[in-house]
Amino acid sequence: MYDMRVPAIVLGAMLCAGGSALAGDGVTVKVLNDTPDALTVTVYDRHARPPQAVVSGEVINGNSSISVSVSADAAGRGHLSWTATSVDRDMRRCGHKDKPGVNDGDTIRVHANRSCPAR
């Protein structure tokens, strides 16, 4: 006698795999702290409406990286912006940049090499 659970399990696995492929219309990039100093980094997905932080206040050690996923447009490219602040409060430095047109697998270099705005 044929067990009907096997085709149901296979069908369920196929639907889950297909669903994740369809839902995976994002772009994954590497955010690299290209300085020797630790930075506090926030990354925004600019395709989201309204734009949303996908990483908020993450400390990235010097010359280290994290992976981040953002939404893709119809061409399969992401749009993100980032802000970075040095962790060292005595020599506080800041940085920011807007990065449209990022591709899956791109490396986004972050740094804090400018004076921070007055509070």
Image (cartoon, rainbow, N blue to C red):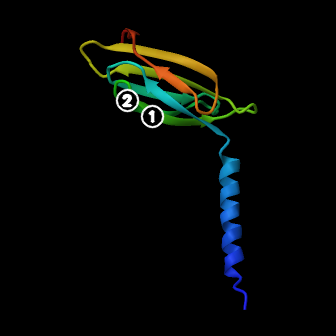
Q: How far, Cα to Cα, is label 2 from label 1?
A: 8 Å
In the displayed structure, 69 sits above or below 98; it is below
Q: Quadrant of residue 52?
A: top right
Classify mark 1: residues with Cα within 10 Å, few (<14), some (14-19) or many (20+). some
Give the residue number, with chain letter if any, for mark 2.
60
96 sits left or right of 91 in the view: right
42 sits left or right of 5 in the view: left
* Residue 61 in picture, x, y percent from top left: 34, 28
Give the residue number, with chain letter if any, for mark 1.
66
The residue positioned 66% from the left and 60% from the top of the image is: 16
Q: Nearer the viewer, residue 41 or 51?
A: 41
69 sits left or right of 75 in the view: left
Q: Quadrant of residue 81?
A: top right
Label disc, if present, on residue 111 of the rendered structure: none
Q: Quadrant of the C terminus?
A: top left
Q: Quadrant of the N terminus?
A: bottom right
Instruction: Say which amino acid is labelled 2.
Output: Ile
> Element at badge 2?
strand
Instruction: Say which amino acid is labelled 1.
Output: Ile
Q: Upstream in the sequence, badge 2 or badge 1?
A: 2
Q: Furthest residue to the left?
A: 90
The residue positioned 32% from the left and 20% from the top of the image is: 37
